[in-house]
Image (cartoon, rainbow, N blue to C red):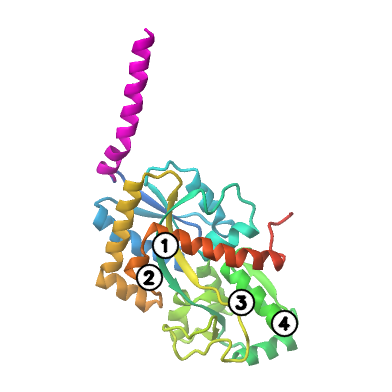
């Protein structure tokens, strides 16, 4: 009897061990969901939808984008962490979700240990953006106007700990200005309020606001970082305009829950590489000012290394600035 039990247990163990390759061989066999922690129409949603549309051609299965807003994307991250590690629930995250928001919002997971990296995705620039009739057109003019109207202007932010939030705080600290922060569930509603004149300024990813800028609905004051943005090369950097600004690279990545089998990770990664090899996809990203990583950087290892380096750079800065979870 004991021998039969032992044989049965051994058979079950061998069956489980053989299950992972078999699962990978048949993957995918049902729709895949990519979770985005922000409202539709924002930069992360746009990246996810372009990616999903091409991945489903490569993988031969439907890829759905699901928006789950709140807490600067960390609610969506929690949903992905709790999902089965079978490759059917993925997450497109970025600097906000995977670097800043986990400092500013209480979370029950480890952002570096509880996700399986798949691939770096695109990156782009942040810009200081203003409503079209704001009486300032350059960084110096904006600083002068804000100092002449202390506390009266409002800055459209996207959740505590977001790249937008950190950028606006840094701008205030470096320039000695003060304005009210208003929080939105995503970049799309924030830029809509800028276009309607309900918001005064923000620090937004360029691609989501480029069409409104070209249409004269909003104005770009200055580009964040050391170099100008190829989407609007006529707009100087903040430093060129006399204002030193925070240099946040607004990058995206694709993750799965921890424990997702490597053969499945490899299949998804191959679909990402195939997506970025497509000329039409590359043009779409170029048109919204997004940069695609070099082919050699589209690996799980590169995403993990980049993500880890970003947390090591920004977490001490954010903690020193007093950014922490509410109530802590």
Q: Which residue is mark 3?
A: 199
Front of the two marks 4 and 2: 2
Would you place residue 302 above or below residue 173 in this image?
A: above
Which quadrant holds the N terminus? top left
Query: How far apart are labels 1 and 3 at the CA level?
Result: 38 Å
Left or right: 158, with 17 as reference point? right
Q: Earlier in the sequence, mark 1 or mark 4?
A: 4
Do the CB atoms of the residues marked 3 and 2 lie less than 8 Å apart? no
Q: Residue at x 53, y 57 (%)?
A: 69
Left or right: 240, with 325 as reference point? left
Q: Nearer the viewer, residue 5 or 281?
A: 5
Residue 183 quadrant? bottom right
Q: Secondary structure at mark 2?
A: loop
Query: How far apart are labels 4 and 2 at the CA level?
Result: 36 Å
Query: How far apart are labels 3 and 2 at the CA level?
Result: 33 Å
Instruction: Bin the neighbour count of mark 3 within 10 Å (Cα to Cα): few under 14, some 14-19, many 20 and up.
Output: many
Q: Which residue is mark 1?
A: 302
Region in magenta: 1-27
């Amino acid at each position: 009897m004991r021998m039969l039990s032992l044989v049965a247990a051994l058979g079950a163990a061998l069956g489980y061990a053989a299950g992972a390759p078999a699962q990978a061989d048949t993957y995918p066999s049902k729709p895949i969901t990519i979770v985005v922690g922000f409202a539709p129409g924002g930069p992360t949603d746009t990246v996810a939808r372009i990616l999903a549309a091409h991945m489903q051609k490569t993988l031969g299965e439907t890829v759905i984008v699901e928006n789950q807003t709140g807490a600067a994307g960390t609610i969506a991250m929690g949903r992905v962490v709790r999902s089965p590690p079978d490759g059917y629930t993925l997450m497109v995250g970025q600097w906000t979700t995977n670097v800043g928001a986990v400092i500013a919002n209480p979370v029950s997971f480890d952002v570096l240990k509880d996700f399986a990296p798949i691939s770096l995705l695109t990156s782009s620039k942040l810009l200081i953006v203003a409503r079209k009739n704001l009486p300032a057109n350059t960084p110096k003019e904006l600083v002068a106007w804000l100092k002449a109207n202390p506390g009266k202007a409002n800055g459209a932010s996207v959740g505590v700990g977001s790249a937008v939030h950190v950028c606006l705080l840094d701008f205030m600290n470096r320039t000695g200005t003060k304005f009210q922060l208003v929080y939105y569930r995503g970049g799309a509603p924030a830029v809509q309020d800028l276009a309607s004149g309900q918001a005064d300024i923000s620090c937004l990813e360029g691609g989501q606001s480029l069409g409104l800028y070209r249409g004269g609905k909003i104005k770009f004051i200055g580009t964040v970082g050391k170099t100008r943005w190829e989407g609007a090369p006529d707009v100087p950097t903040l430093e060129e305009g006399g204002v030193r600004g925070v240099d946040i690279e607004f990058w995206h990545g694709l993750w799965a829950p921890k424990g997702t089998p490597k053969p499945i990770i490899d299949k998804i990664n191959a679909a990402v590489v195939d997506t970025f090899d497509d000329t039409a996809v590359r043009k779409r990203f170029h048109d919204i000012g997004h940069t695609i990583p070099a082919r050699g950087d589209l690996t799980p290892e590169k995403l993990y290394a980049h993500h880890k380096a970003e947390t090591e750079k920004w977490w001490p800065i954010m903690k020193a600035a007093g950014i922490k979870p509410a109530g802590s």
